[in-house]
Amino acid sequence: MLRFIVRRLVQMVGVMVVLSLLLFLWLRALPGGTVSAILGERATPASRAAMEEAFGLDQPVHIQYFKFVGRVLQGDFGPSTSVLPGTDALDIFLQRFPATIELSFFAMVIAIALGIPLGYFAARRRATFFDNASVIVSLVGVAVPVFFLGFLLKYIFAIKLGWLPVSGRQDGQLEATRVTGFFVLDGLLTREFDASWDALKHLVLPSITLASVPFAVIFRITRAAVLEVLDEDYIRTAESKGLTAKVIRGRHILRNAMLPVTTTIGLQLGALLAGAVLTERVFSWGGLGEALALSFERRDYPVLQVVILAAAMIYVIVNLLVDIMYAVIDPRVRTR
Amino acid sequence: MTTTTPRDTNPMDATPTDTSNVADRDKARRWQQGGSEPLLKVRDLRVTFQRQGQEPFEAVQGVSFDVHPGQTVGLVGESGCGKSVTSLAIMGLLPARGNKVTGTVDYEGTNLLDLSDQQMRDKRGKDIAMVFQDPLSSLNPVIPIGLQVTEVLERHRGMSRKAATPVARDLLDRVGIPDPDRRLKDYPHQLSGGMRQRALIAIALACQPRLLIADEPTTALDVTIQAQILALLKELVEDTGTALVMITHDLGVVAGLCDEVNVLYGGRIVERGERHDLFAQPRHPYTHGLLASIPRLDAPRGQRLNPIPGSVSDNLPWTSACAFAPRCSQPIEVCTQKMPELVEQHQRALRCFNPVEANR
């Protein structure tokens, strides 16, 4: 098991090197570029040259890359050029990351808590009204554009009914104390329970919006996996042993059905953590998704680099965790 | 106890002598004459598959047979004759949706078909257990063998897992799995085919059921392993007095193991008899054909094999004819006009208008 993890960690380093190279080259190949973004269309050649020299953009590409890697390894991505000019790009990332984690966490909890049980029951009641209805709901979940669902929920529950806040993560007037950057957790740690409650209320609509796609995917995969497992001979064996329905469900059906579901959850979680651009924009969430969109629009390379590199790293780490989970669930993977 | 203990009545390593023959017949007669109440009485068992958009299909059409305590009864026939469906219906393992089961399955005075799901769960694995065909797919791949044995003991004996573990160890030892302590922690994919089937047998026998149903337990195994597993089954049912219903298409298995044999065709029993009688004098053309189709090593060189022509898909409906008539070697006119009844006579039962001559 340990060897398995070490091997995967080494692979991870390789993945990150390739990723950083691709990212660097891709960003340099984009039309426009930092200098035009900062100085505008009418910059003089002299001012352009001065700017390029200041950013080291006049040097050969490979020198730029190695300098870039060297700085990255020291955590120095340089200051933001246009999103928040002058602020360290890494700080922008670190400040926004908890917002994204908090939102993704709640969205994922909703998606899993609904997707797995509903998927299981839909499979057990295959081709009944319940099954057909939930399959249609899950189809809607995938098919409705996230920004549309976000605006719809916001319009009904925040604007028309006024039950929930329209946007943001917390009411600024509360002046809540910050500890970890996770607002709900901060409120609990500092015993400012009203701050936690307010943060939770802010989370409801965005996390439901963000959960729609992962819920639909987890539901469908669970349903398909359970249907497949139900046909397996070992379920018949379990029934022939007279085991209780509870043991058969947990130990025999779900444990086997969780293999494909685990992979799905990992992929979805990776996607959420890498930034939910649309949801975060609709609810002005202030997370990575927003930072990604802004830095892209304004060609803020330092910020863009941090966000993309971090997103890739999150993806790789989540995948590693999925593989470990897989080995925990399935002994056949362990011995391979 | 190990599986290599020589047993004088083991037909796998000794050819039946005349004396064992007579003993077997005496035993059969005792059962037939009501020396003991049957443990299991199956009467007019019918199973109909009702699938959406399809004609209902009656896979089992009124099967009746008895199993006495300690008796081994064979259900023999080719694929699709309803033998496996019969066993699943007895166990209550057919899904409720899309299947209609009627008739009675009387187990010690209780009709199993009347029991609730919960009551049936209390019986399965404790009073009636089952061994399945493919040992790899019949074991849960992500659970250690040990737990797959102990969970039955936990369920029916109310034992803690800790208390059940040494019992499971002894069970694995009993069915001839070497190094049982290590095997408890192993997963199914780490065991060989024969060992997996031994593990399945250990699971089935864990609660000392009075009736064991084995559905083609050796079909997925190598020939050498087949003999070992059959010997093990025979030894275990004789030691524990467990009654065994053996479902197979393999007449070799029947010859080695069964006291009484039921031959099924198209969802109905066509012939029943004590093993030696049936093998010596098959009366139904189907049974006769099955026996004649076994290739013989001592056949003259160049002699052709004797298959039964056609397949189950040629069957006529039992309601208006003999289903076997289109494949029969000696049909007469009446065979395609009405259904022959199962007639009981001299400890034999036969469903045929034109049986094969005795002593032919």
Image (cartoon, rainbow, N blue to C red):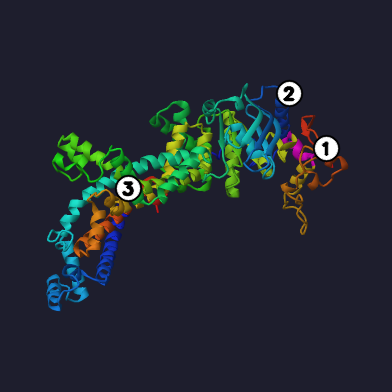
Position of A29 relative to B243 (above/below): below
Residue at the disc numbered 2 = B33
Give residue B338's mark: 1
Tell me: residue B152, above or below residue A276.
above
Q: Chain of mark 1?
A: B
Tally of numbered discs: 3
Instruction: Tell whether B248 sits left or right of B293.
Output: left
Sequence-first disc among 1 and 2: 2
Q: Amino acid at mark 2?
A: Gln
Instruction: Give the residue number, with chain letter if any, for mark 3.
Output: A151
Asked which secondary structure carries label 1, the reply is: loop
**Is residue B88 shown left or right of residue B337?**
left
Q: CA distance from mark 1 to mark 3?
A: 73 Å
Give the amino acid type for the residue marked by disc 1 in the picture. Answer: Lys
Counting from the top left corner in percent of width and height, residue A159 is at 29, 42
> Is residue A194 toward the left or the right of residue B335 in the image?
left
Q: Which residue is at 29% across, 47% downward?
A: A104
Q: Which residues are magenta?
A: B273-284
Vertically, is B108 above or below B337? Answer: above
Report which quarter residue B104 is drawn in. top right
> Do discs 2 and 3 belong to a common subunit?
no
Nearest to viewer (mark 1 / mark 2): 1
Q: Is residue A209 visible?
A: yes
